Amino acid sequence: MKILTLCTAFPRNKSDVITPWLVRFLKELEKKGHEIYIFTSSYKGLKQKSFNNFKIFRFRYFISNFETLTHDVAIPERLKENIIYYFLVPFYLFGGIKGVFKYKNFLKKVKIDVIHVHWPIPHIIFGYLFKVFLKSPIVSTFHSAELILLKNITKSKFTGKIFVNFFKYFLKKSSFITVNSSYTKSLIKVFNLPEKKVKVIPFGVSLDIFDLNLEGKSYAKEKKVLFVGRLVERKGVKYLIEAFKIFSQKYSDYKLCIVGDGPLKNDLFKLTSELKIDEKVNFLGFVDKSVLLKEYLTSSIFVLPAIFDSKGDTEGLGVVLIESMYFGTPVIATSVGGIVDIVIDGYNGFLVKEKDVTGLALAMDRLVSDSTLQEKFVKNAKEFVNKNFSWQNIVNSFEKIYTLSL
């Protein structure tokens, strides 16, 4: 099949860390013989036309220096940074529509089989236009963040109803709607879509041990607690740092490694200094895939302390948990959002309440002090991930939906 993928952002080069799970998903589709085409936004005038074997069609939406609504951070996070970014949203929509008209004739000749829309709010608008021009069916996939954004910009009952009905009209043009977790499925109930059209299909690990030439190599576990993710409010990293302060009073030889970057970095630096644990906390920033994999393989514990942030946003799924489990690192997480689809408390990891600093510290203590429990979690987690989050199952599920859409 020839699949046109619509998304907010896509890697600008091989070292870019944006949407790694989406890139992996598309690679897996390509392995099955499908041709992939990408329609996405530009970044500072970027005119990139390919990535690996994927053909890319980037639409422009503003003056080059100000085309920063996407890529560096997710749009919801960008909008939280400064109200001025809301000014770019209508230009983004107009630019996307203009991009559809610009590329439709070429894509007509390609004869696209299926249009796959990621983050349907607002990309379903572009998807619908492509459907009209290309005569191809739409499959829409929600990742939760766009639904929280919709909820926050439509707090008025009157305007909220208008927005919901507007997007509902376009969403009904989709042959199927997929969501990445049961939590995200609960959020789309606002559109009152037919249940038979909605499917829960998660995504899997973005790292491939074979691509990184690390198969067969072994790495010893170090006395290290690991976090991977954006340094934004909903990740709850401040609570992990506070919990690590308690934990380190008993386990003084342990380090906390934080992989990722974001707007809260300086605040978190300051917090570690105030707690007098800055020598025990390593901020690694964004790292390449091989370094990230080694962090997974050498860490004793992985912790995702996600919370519901001030805007009501939280983890739609938690792919980093799936990656930790896949690479044999026992996990601790909070019981919010899509995380509960991954971590079963006491079976393949520990779940604690959000913002529960003491609970996080106790869970780390309990896990570090019990090697038998660690082995149990690692064994059960690998089996759980292989059964529920394997790329083979994920791709097969989407292929089935694509075929039924034709």
Image: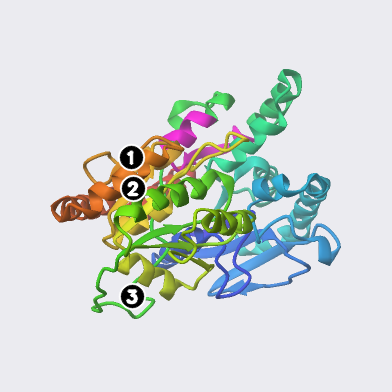
Q: Is residue 125 above or below residue 264?
A: above
- Please say whether residue 177 is one of the residues in the magenta stretch: yes
Q: Residue at x 61, y 69 (%)?
A: 55
Q: Are marks 3 and 2 in contact (CB under 8 Å)?
A: no
- Dot 3 corresponds to which residue? 210
- Dot 2 corresponds to which residue? 332
Give the percent coordinates (x, y) of residue 271. Answer: 55, 53
Q: Are marks 2 and 1 in contact (CB under 8 Å)?
A: yes
Q: Secondary structure at mark 3?
A: loop
- Crowd rating for badge 3 (residues with CA inside 10 Å; few <14, some 14–19, many 20+): few
What amino acid does circle 2 point to?
Answer: Ile
Is residue 316 found left or right of 102 in the rendered image?
left
What amino acid does circle 1 point to?
Answer: Leu
Q: Is residue 19 above or below residue 342?
A: below
186 or 80, which is in the foreground? 80
- Crowd rating for badge 2 (residues with CA inside 10 Å; few <14, some 14–19, many 20+): many
What amino acid does circle 3 point to?
Answer: Phe
Give the percent coordinates (x, y) of residue 160. Answer: 71, 24
Q: Is residue 100 above or below residue 288?
A: above
- Dot 1 corresponds to which residue? 351
Nearer mark to the viewer, of 3 and 2: 2
Mark with earlier residue (3, 1): 3
Is residue 175 found left or right of 255 in the rendered image?
right
Q: Is residue 134 visible?
A: yes
- The part of the image, by quadrant, that contains residue 12 is bottom right
